[in-house]
Image (spheres, helix red, strand yellow):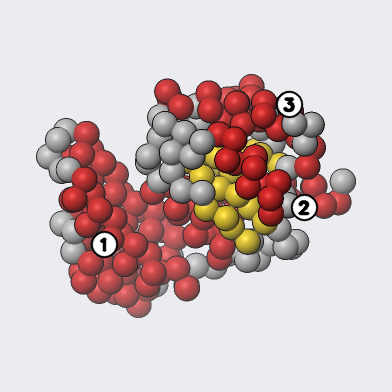
Amino acid sequence: MGEKQEILQQLAQAVVEMDEEAAVTVAEQAFRVGIDPYEAITDGLTVGMGIVNEKFENEEYFVPEILLCADAMYAGLEVLRPHLKIEAASHHARVVIGVVEGDTHDIGKNLVKMMLETAALEVYDLGRNVPLHDFVDKALEIDAQMICLSTLMTTTMDGMKKVVDILEEKGVRDRFVVMVGGGPISQTFADSIGADGYAANAAAAVRKANELIENMVTA
């Protein structure tokens, strides 16, 4: 096994083993040997959290373990985050982000939030299991330009369409760009519900957010 792969595996292992100290140490090592910080996050820390989620679903881990694993992941993220090379957004914009009602999986959403903030966007995180009207209410309250909706569950995907429907019903759909993402989401689904954009991962989310905001400002 090459050094890079070994380090990525150690990052994942630190998360699975709930070891914050190891997560920090290995993340620092990843940076020192020249591993791309985003790759260290997605192919190391995030992979570890995926294993943790599987253990939770198989009832090997429970909520206390999940929280400790998340602490280890975020400890590693804090080391790598300052070194992410992300092009700053060309326009200042306010973004409302959250996981739609019925879903409590927020690791992906948190990673997207971090990447958007790194791109100098102003992000308002509503958290997880967010009532659908709250997305619209918050976006109106802060005069946001974008609403980002996330879910990891097929059973809550319809909530994304309902948010778009609420915007239509209030007559404010054209005031916001709506971006969707998450495990079961696709471009086809985004198109079917009238969303403006879809991103398969956090890096793509930043590029798509910049593109959508640019188009909105220059329209």
Numbered marks: total: 3
Element type at marker 2?
helix
* x then y, percent, for residue 22: 20, 69
- Between 97 and 45, which is closer to the camera in this rendering? 97
Which dot, 3 or 1, sits closer to the camera?
Answer: 3
Q: Amino acid at mark 2?
A: Glu
Which image quadrant for residue 27? bottom left
| Residue furthest to the left | 60
Looking at the image, residue 74 sits to the left or right of residue 146; the answer is left
Dot 1: few (<14), some (14–19), or many (≥20) neighbours within 10 Å?
Answer: many
What is the spatial separation of the Cα atoms under label 3 and label 2, in whole angstroms? 26 Å
Nearest to N terminus: mark 2 or mark 1: 1
Callout 3 amino acid: Glu
Discs 3, 1 touching: Cβ within 8 Å: no
Q: Which mark is residue 169?
A: 3
Of all residues, the one furthest to the right in this rendering is 219
Residue type at mark 1? Ala
Q: Is residue 151 left or right of residue 209?
A: left
In the displayed image of the protein, which residue is found farthest to the bottom? 32
Number of the front mark, 3 or 2? 3
- Does residue 208 appear in this view? no
Say which label, 3 or 2, has the lower sequence index.
3
- Tag 2 residue: 214
Residue 110 placement, left or right of 141: left
Which mark, residue 72? 1
Relative depth, front residue between 50 and 59 = 59
Q: Position of residue 21 (x, y in %)?
A: 21, 71
Report crowding for label 3: few under 14, some 14 to 19, many 20 or more residues within 10 A (C-alpha). Answer: few
Q: Residue at x 29, y 55 (%)?
A: 70
